Image: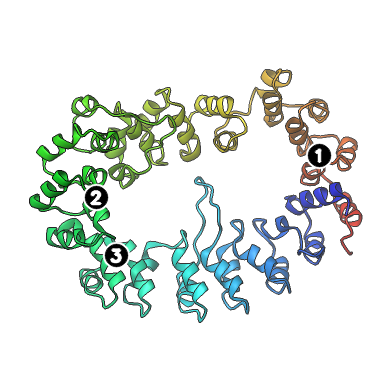
């Protein structure tokens, strides 16, 4: 197949205006590696298309659908009885990628319950590794016969009944007991002391467990896992002060992030923050990403990592959002563009201008609040092609301008124009045959159905 025919076909496969009969024709196509994956990863697939995918003879097609972030969970769930364990494992794990602004909808609990009892261990393992399980289902695994499932249940510790917590701490399986103890130790210093005797759990126990003073003093004296110890909420104040002057910079940085410190004391500690460090491991902020007061406190801090940690919350109160938007920290701005639904337009534009071509710039440009009006007047003749491309986003851009930009010297600008529904039809037909523009043109929603069919004909897709 000629390369640009394949590119045009890929574009047609994701075209939102693709009629159902042509979609079904595309799904029946197999050039040796199944239909174009864009065809079965579309959102809102009609029932006839879903039926074809579920019965497709190539398991790779069913696997792609099982992991589609665009498919409705109830549609994907129909693969729970697929004869291939690879397909069922793909279903159990779910989509590999989730836009932070568009969470993946989980499978129904009843389907997860079937998958956790699947006869193939790879399916059970995939389900337990899935990032898309709801806490209530995870908690339901506390009494499951499989130790791996019970071990996973401790992730839902805070909603487990007291009796189930106690049973997990006393579980017959040592790995389940250790996992449960690492949660129970937050409120029981004797559990913490037991974990400290196990090299596999000592660091985590020091980070989160309730400490006996003798254990804390011994660890400070021996220099054992001091970074973990510096984060421990129960560390006595005098030992916090000793660690604040530790010769190890990473220890001092960990101390500087403690929640009980005043801003004056925090900023008196000698610490250094990496230019690109994001603060995602600041536990008290991470655990409070829905708590307005935690977020306000972190956003108002002079500590860069606390501000960056707060910027990762989509629940920032308006006053905290305004404060962070004025910090002049490029990392904070990039995080706001990725995570916050109300990131200010000026922040998004600064991220785009500074980081063009990166994931953060793409997240900024695709943000619902990214500016649209006025871009044609501002950027259609900009010397930088990345900015000329923005002119295509303007609702006021004329068909003549879109056509002009489809001839732009920068390929990204040409591709944006080729995919815009305002591109005049003669030019749209023309760019379908231009290798670097064929995919964008094929996805153009203004492409007539007969042109989509012609693309399929040229690509060898049987009618």
Scheme of colours in the image: rainbow
Q: Are marks 1 and 3 in contact (CB under 8 Å)?
A: no
- In the image, what residue occupies the spot 45% across and 31% down? 331
| Crowd band around label 2 with a 10 angstrom C-alpha radius: few (<14), some (14–19), many (20+) | many
- Find the residue positioned furthest to the front: 222
- In the image, what residue occupies the spot 46% across and 59% down? 131
The residue that mark 1 highlights is 437
The residue that mark 3 highlights is 179
Instruction: Determine if residue 272 is in view.
Output: yes
- In the image, what residue occupies the spot 15% across and 59% down? 193
Instruction: Determine if residue 139 is in view.
Output: no
Query: Is 335 or 147 nearer to us in this picture?
Result: 147
Where residue 17 sits in the image (x, y, percent)?
A: 76, 50
Q: Could you say which disc has been placed on residue 33 in the image?
A: none
Where residue 250 sits in the image (x, y, percent)?
A: 30, 37
Q: CA distance from mark 2 to mark 1?
A: 53 Å
The residue that mark 2 highlights is 207
Mark 1 / mark 3, whichever is N-terminal: 3
Q: Which numbered mark, 2 or 1, is in the foreground of this view?
A: 2
Q: Please tell me whether residue 121 is drawn above or below residue 257 in the rendered image.
A: below
Mark 3 / mark 2, whichever is N-terminal: 3
Q: Which numbered mark, 1 or 3, is in the foreground of this view?
A: 3
Where residue 20 sits in the image (x, y, percent)?
A: 77, 60
Locate the C terminus and report the quarter of the image it occupies. bottom right
Mark 2 / mark 1, whichever is N-terminal: 2
SS class, disc 1 = loop
Q: Is residue 141 left or right of residue 8?
A: left
Where residue 283 sits in the image (x, y, percent)?
A: 30, 45
């Amino acid at each position: 197949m000629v390369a640009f025919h394949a590119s045009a076909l890929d574009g047609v496969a994701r075209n939102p205006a693709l009629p159902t009969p042509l979609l079904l024709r595309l799904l029946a196509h197999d050039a040796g590696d199944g239909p174009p994956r864009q065809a079965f990863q579309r959102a809102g697939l009609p029932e006839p298309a879903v039926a074809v995918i579920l019965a497709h003879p190539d398991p790779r097609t069913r696997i792609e659908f099982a992991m589609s972030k665009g498919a409705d969970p109830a549609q994907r769930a129909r693969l729970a009885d697929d004869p291939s364990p690879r397909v069922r494992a793909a279903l159990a794990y779910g989509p590999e990628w989730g836009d932070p602004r568009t969470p993946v909808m989980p499978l129904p609990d009843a389907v997860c319950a079937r998958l956790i009892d699947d006869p193939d261990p790879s399916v059970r393992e995939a389900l337990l590794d899935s990032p898309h399980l709801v806490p209530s289902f995870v908690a339901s695994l506390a009494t499951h016969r499989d130790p791996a499932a019970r071990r996973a249940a401790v992730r839902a510790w805070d909603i487990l009944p007291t009796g189930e917590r106690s049973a997990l701490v006393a579980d017959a399986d040592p790995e389940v007991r250790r996992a449960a103890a690492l949660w129970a130790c937050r409120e029981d210093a004797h559990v913490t002391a037991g974990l400290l005797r196990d090299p596999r759990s000592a660091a985590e126990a020091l980070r989160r467990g309730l400490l006996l003073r003798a254990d804390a003093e011994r660890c400070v004296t021996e220099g054992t896992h001091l970074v973990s110890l510096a984060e421990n909420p129960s560390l006595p104040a005098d030992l916090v002060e000793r660690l604040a002057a530790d010769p190890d910079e990473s220890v001092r940085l960990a101390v500087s992030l403690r929640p009980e410190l005043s801003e004056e004391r925090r900023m008196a500690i000698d610490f250094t923050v990496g230019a690109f460090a994001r603060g995602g491991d600041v536990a008290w902020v991470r655990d409070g990403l829905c708590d307005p007061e935690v977020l306000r406190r972190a956003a108002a801090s002079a500590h860069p990592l606390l501000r960056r940690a707060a910027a990762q919350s989509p629940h920032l109160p308006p006053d905290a959002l305004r404060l962070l938007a004025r910090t002049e920290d490029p990392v904070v701005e990039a995080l706001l563009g990725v995570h916050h639904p109300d990131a200010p337009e000026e922040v998004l534009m600064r991220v785009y201008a500074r980081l063009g071509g990166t994931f953060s710039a793409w997240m900024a440009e695709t943000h619902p609040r990214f500016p649209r009006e006025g871009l044609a007047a501002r950027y259609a003749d900009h010397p930088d092609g990345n900015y000329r491309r923005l002119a295509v986003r303007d609702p006021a851009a004329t068909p003549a301008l879109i056509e002009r930009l489809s001839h732009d010297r920068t390929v990204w600008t040409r591709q944006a124009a080729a995919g815009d529904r305002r591109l005049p039809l003669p030019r749209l037909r023309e760019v379908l045959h231009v290798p670097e523009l064929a995919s964008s043109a094929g996805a153009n929603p203004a492409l007539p159905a007969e042109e989509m069919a012609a693309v399929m004909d040229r690509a060898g897709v049987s009618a």
